[in-house]
Image: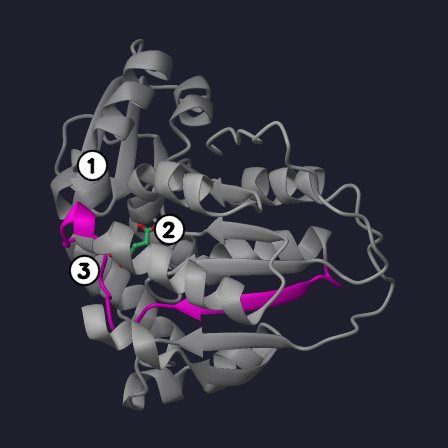
Amino acid sequence: MVIPIQFPSEMRLSQGDEAPTILIIDSGVGGLSVYDEIAKLLPTARYLYVFDNAGFPYGTKEESFIIERVVQITQQMADRYPINLAVIACNTASTITLPRLRDTFSFPVIGVVPAIKPAAQLTRNGVVGLLATQGTIRREYTYELIKQFATDCQIEMLGASSLVELAERKLQRQDVSLNEVRAAVMDWLKLPKIPDTIILGCTHFPLLKEELQQVFPSETIFVDSGIAVARRAVFLLKDFTIPTLSQSSNVAFSTLEDEKSALLLPVLRQYRFEKLENLTNIERIA
Ligand code: DGL
């Protein structure tokens, strides 16, 4: 589900021949699952992907910490690039940062929040599982969504920070065993009625979908918000001429240069990010 966007009345996207520049932000590799869906619909846009590895993981951090970092990262990127759209590709950050970002920046900002509404419509046994970070399952925003869209079903919530780490490891091309994935969701596997529909309420989790599918019963439906975000991006950029060929290269940014970020280079290339740069100033608030 995508948080609806509000345009200030004086704001309009400008038309032009250049590919729109889309900024995508997450604490780590999770936002690549959202980028992947957007890039399927808008393959020739220019993408800037920031993974805030100095602030990672967001799921266990204070709200004020996350808000400050996301605003500072967006500011630094907006100072360097003509951003046409920002996507906060992180459920944990989206549930708290969007009002500040929309007040601060003139370009549209899309957030990602757990797909509670579609999941409530898809469940057959009446039990929906929300698999997210500890931060997301605590948020008022999440409770409001449940109250609005899922009063007819039982919602089980699980804060699974270890899955966030496993997704990072998987994209660093390190081994991730099914036993580790199983251990992260064991509380649900022991339930008398296991959720038959599971919301991947953290953008890291679609990266582990194959493993999750093997751990849960085969009829389990997994729902995430990636496609909805991508459709929203297309809508918001509809006044742009989208070129048939890519004109400029995509760039990924880390907020901390370390061994783990270097391990991501091959996978970033697979996602068509040719360069990995560093946003050094952000380190101050880590
Ligand atoms: N990928 C993020 C989310 O969607 C957060 C992961 C983390 O840093 O804890 O919630």
In the rendered structure, does residue 50 fall within the stretch colored magenta?
A: yes
Element marked by disc 1: helix
Q: Nearer the viewer, mark 1 or mark 3?
A: 1
Disc assigned to residue 90: 2
The residue at the far top in this view is: 152
Instruction: State left or right for residue 97 relative to residue 283.
Output: right
Instruction: State left or right for residue 118 relative to residue 146.
Output: right
- Which residue in the structure is indicated by mark 3? 162
Q: Position of residue 253 (x, y in %)?
A: 45, 76
Type of the residue with mark 2: Cys
In three-dimensional space, the C-alpha distance between marks 1 and 3, rounded to whole angstroms, equals 15 Å
Cβ of mark 2 under 8 Å from ligand 1: the answer is yes
Q: Residues in magenta?
A: 43-64
- Which residue in the structure is indicated by mark 1? 137
Type of the residue with mark 1: Ile
Instruction: State left or right for residue 155 relative to residue 124.
Output: left
Cβ of mark 1 under 8 Å from ligand 1: the answer is no
Label 1 vs 3, first from the N-terminus: 1
Q: Quadrant of the C terminus?
A: bottom left
Question: What residue sits 26% from the left and 55% below the top?
Answer: 68
In three-dimensional space, the C-alpha distance between marks 1 and 2, rounded to whole angstroms, equals 13 Å
**Residue 108 position by quadrant:** top right
